[in-house]
Image (cartoon, grey):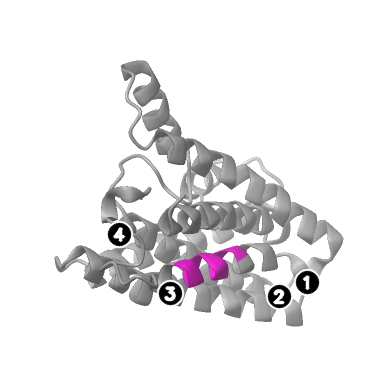
């Protein structure tokens, strides 16, 4: 497994943990799965729907806004190595910084019921996951693999099975598996101690960032081989 493959699987794991934390501790919404949030905005018979609607809209607005800004920031075409370096520097690193702020806030005020603090954590986490999404997409060019949602990945996987195509299949399958495994880990951490809620996602994203940032010792011209070697 290449370094990029390992990093992106860690990011999928991190996204699953982040969504589990958000759903269980931030009012039953998601900070990576925007499809789920859009569905939640229409479930008007749900208890405390007004709060769910507010939280879901904050997540969607910040996720979409940061997606746009991140794509604009990295739009200029460059060499493969420069594209990867810029993706890490401008997207993945800021994402881990935002997740660090989430961890600090939650450590200071675990399981908070204060609406303002909860909204701030949702906005920061959604922004971090949006940066991660764009960063992962910029790192490689295998279609149908994401690190923050799996519906498209599942669709591409089954299409490849039906059409008997094998390129990139194993990494797509592992990416799908990593998301719920991360959710299990995030749920376990939150059950163990409330302050640990966002820590699992933060640690996994931090390790992924380190894998992507440190260049290969042999100086092969990119951190880990050609851009097409991993999921996007």
In front: mark 3 or mark 1?
Answer: 3
Alpha carbon distance from label 3 to label 4:
17 Å
In front: mark 2 or mark 3?
Answer: 3
Q: Which residue is mark 4?
A: 138
Instruction: Give percent across and percent down for residue 189.
Output: 77, 60
The answer to which of 49 and 157 lies nearer the viewer is: 157
Which residues are drawn in magenta? 204-211
**157 left or right, relative to 109:** left
**142 left or right, relative to 153:** left
Alpha carbon distance from label 1 to label 4:
33 Å
Q: Which residue is mark 1?
A: 195
Whether label 2 touches label 4, CB < 8 Å? no
In front: mark 3 or mark 4?
Answer: 3
Q: Which residue is mark 3?
A: 214
SS at circle 2: helix
In front: mark 2 or mark 4?
Answer: 4
Give residue 221's mark: none
SS at circle 3: loop
Q: Quick one: label 2 or label 4, which is nearer the N terminus?
A: 2
């Amino acid at each position: 497994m290449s370094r990029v493959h390992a990093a992106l699987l860690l990011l999928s794991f991190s996204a699953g943990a982040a969504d589990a934390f958000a759903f269980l501790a931030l009012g039953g919404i998601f900070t990576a799965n925007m499809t789920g949030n859009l569905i939640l905005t229409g479930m008007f018979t749900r208890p405390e729907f007004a709060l769910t609607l507010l939280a879901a809209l904050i997540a969607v607005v910040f996720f979409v806004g940061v997606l746009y800004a991140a794509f604009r920031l990295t739009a200029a075409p460059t060499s493969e190595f420069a594209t990867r370096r810029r993706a890490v520097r401008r997207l993945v690193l800021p994402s881990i910084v935002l997740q660090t702020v989430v961890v600090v806030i939650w450590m200071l005020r675990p399981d908070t019921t204060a609406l303002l603090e909860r909204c701030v954590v949702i906005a920061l986490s959604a922004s971090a996951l949006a940066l991660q999404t764009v960063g992962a997409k910029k790192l490689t060019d295998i279609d149908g693999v994401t690190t923050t949602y799996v519906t498209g990945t599942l669709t591409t996987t089954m299409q490849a099975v039906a059409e008997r195509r094998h390129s990139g299949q194993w990494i797509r399958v592992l990416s799908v598996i990593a998301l719920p495994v991360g959710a299990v880990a995030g749920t376990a951490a939150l059950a163990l101690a409330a302050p640990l809620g966002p820590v699992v996602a933060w640690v996994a994203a931090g390790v992924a960032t380190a894998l992507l940032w440190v260049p290969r010792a042999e100086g092969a011209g990119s951190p880990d081989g050609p851009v097409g070697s991993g999921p996007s």
